[in-house]
Amino acid sequence: MNSAGTLVIIKQWSGYFLALFTFIIHRYAASGHTTGVYGIYSRMIYPGLRKLYDHSLGNLPFPFIYVVISLLAVLLAVMVRQAIKTGKIKGMARGIVQFFLLVINLAGWLYFLFYFLWGFNYYGPTLSSRLNLPLAKPDSLWLTKEIEGVTATVNLMRRNISTDTTELETCPDWDELELYLRNEEAGLLASLGQRTDGKVRIRALRPKGLLLRFSTAGVYIPFACEGHVDPGLHCLQWPFTMAHEMAHGYGFTDEGECNFIALLVCSRSDRDLVRYSALLTYWKYLYFDVSTSNDTLASKHYYNLHAGVRADLKAIRKASDKYPDIMPQLRDLIYDNYLKSHGVKKGLASYNEIVDLMYKWQKSGRRGVFVTGDL
């Protein structure tokens, strides 16, 4: 076989080869070499990818995911055309087989790129082990004191922002907020001894409601190397959600850990609205935990909120209700199984680990969340 024939085979079967290569790495990691695989990826591959992308395509004035989707659409069109051409020459059955072989080859490429561009971060250690947090679980007494303290803090913050008890409607400038949060997050992670290579972008994914209709406020898409947040969210949710997706971009995979990082980043901010965004979200997680065991007590904490805070919570719910979920049960089933298959044992419930992590953080001798943002 000549060199031209060899190149054709490699091109036609490249997705299969790359998928097999990726699968072998997974099996190698599963055989007791998780630390080694993550060590190589986190030190030699991901930082380079992060810097290369963030300082090139990351400078585009629009989300790169639009380009990715367009390229996929073109590829599928070419594949269909090639299958039709094959069908005309060699028969319809041969054309259909040709199309499915091309689709599987493309799927192999996507499987490889998902892990090569980001997914191997799932082999990283937990945030608790990175920060040497103690093995501890919050009890009902701590949970009660915590929600009482956060309620008082949120009320005070709200009064400082505005004496008006109607909902807050001022939206920050997206690009300026993204730059500000990136600097804040890089500073926080560096202070905790974590790498922050590159400059992770967080894009507004339009049209509004595209993510919210799938019960998702934001998503990090490895194929685009960028985080995305639905601008249909109420403005008060922007800072926390942007910081959460930025944590994914810096290599953190667990949803609860990204929530916790977002809380630390935003609550230490010198901007009232950014701190308020974080503590309002944290209050909601605390409220959920309390309500699971004592709904009456949870209601008491809700009515202890400042009238303006309650107005903001209602406005946040109203903004989300503009975009009703599409097949929420199917979405939850798929994503829950996806998380569990990648080592996130609690699946969707991992989002609520923000409360457990705050408890461990405090038990380790660190300070909790205060009005001053001093952690």
Image: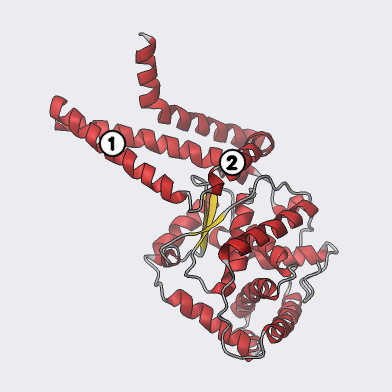
Picture coordinates of residue 285, whole percent (x, y): 62, 73
Q: Earlier in the sequence, mark 2 or mark 1?
A: 1
Name the residue rendered at 72%, 64% in the picture: 264
Q: Which mark is residue 269?
A: none
Given residues 342 and 117, the one toward you in this image is: 117
Picture coordinates of residue 48, whole percent (x, y): 64, 37
Disc 2 secondary structure class: helix
Q: Quadrant of residue 145 in the image?
A: bottom right
Q: Amino acid at mark 2?
A: Phe
**Vertical arrangement, residue 187 with respect to residue 7, above or below:** below
Q: Is residue 350 left or right of residue 368?
A: left
Residue 299 visible to the viewer:
no
Picture coordinates of residue 154, whole percent (x, y): 70, 81
Q: Quadrant of the N terminus?
A: top left
Residue under label 2: 120
Name the residue rendered at 56%, 85% in the picture: 167
**Vertical arrangement, residue 195 with respect to residue 144, above or below:** above
Disc 1 secondary structure class: helix
Given residues 39 and 207, the one toward you in this image is: 207
Crowd rating for badge 2 (residues with CA inside 10 Å; few <14, some 14–19, many 20+): many
Q: Is residue 83 left or right of residue 312?
A: left
Q: Which mark is residue 78?
A: 1
